[in-house]
Image (tube, grey):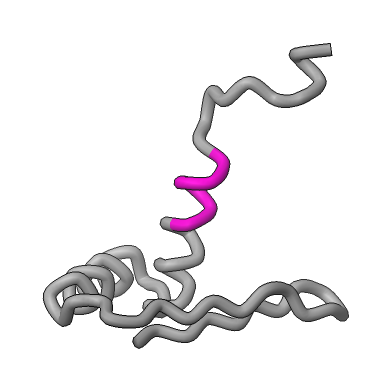
Amino acid sequence: MIALMAKTGNYQVANVNVRNLPDEVHRAIRIQAALHGRSTEAEIRDILERAARPEGRVKLGSFL
């Protein structure tokens, strides 16, 4: 299980728990984090942010 808790400014944001993550996936993320010079938590946050907000996506204002 991986638990994430991010704090931005003076307020706390969402916590995420990932259960039943295969050891080889966790190991790969730890290695990737080390290669990027950051913590495993920071690496996972970056992966999630890139997945949730991909570059080139059409934003709501563009639809209006």
Q: Position of residue 48 (x, y in %)?
A: 48, 57
Q: Residue at image x 45%, y 77%?
A: 41
Q: Position of residue 58 (x, y in %)?
A: 63, 21
Number of marks in the rendered image: 0
Reply above or below: 44 against 62.
below
Quarter the N terminus occupies: bottom left
Name the side, left or right, on which 23 lies relative to 39.
left
Quarter the C terminus occupies: top right
Q: Where is residue 13, by image quadrant? A: bottom right
Magenta range is 48-53
Q: Residue at image x 60%, y 82%?
A: 5
Name the side, left or right, on which 5 lies relative to 10.
left
Q: Where is residue 32, by image quadrant? A: bottom left
Reply above or below: 51 against 44.
above
Q: Residue at image x 61%, y 79%?
A: 15
Q: Position of residue 54 (x, y in %)?
A: 50, 36
Q: Where is residue 10, by image quadrant? A: bottom right
Question: Dominant secondary structure of the magenta stretch?
Answer: helix
Reply above or below: 37 against 59.
below
Q: Residue at image x 48%, y 81%?
A: 17
Instruction: Assess whether residue 37 is covered by the magenta stretch.
Output: no
Q: Nearer the viewer, residue 2 or 35?
A: 2
The single residue placed furthest to the front in the displayed view is 20
Q: Nearer the viewer, residue 41 or 58?
A: 58
Q: Position of residue 26 (x, y in %)?
A: 24, 77
The single residue placed furthest to the left in the displayed view is 24
Name the side, left or right, on which 52 lies relative to 40.
right
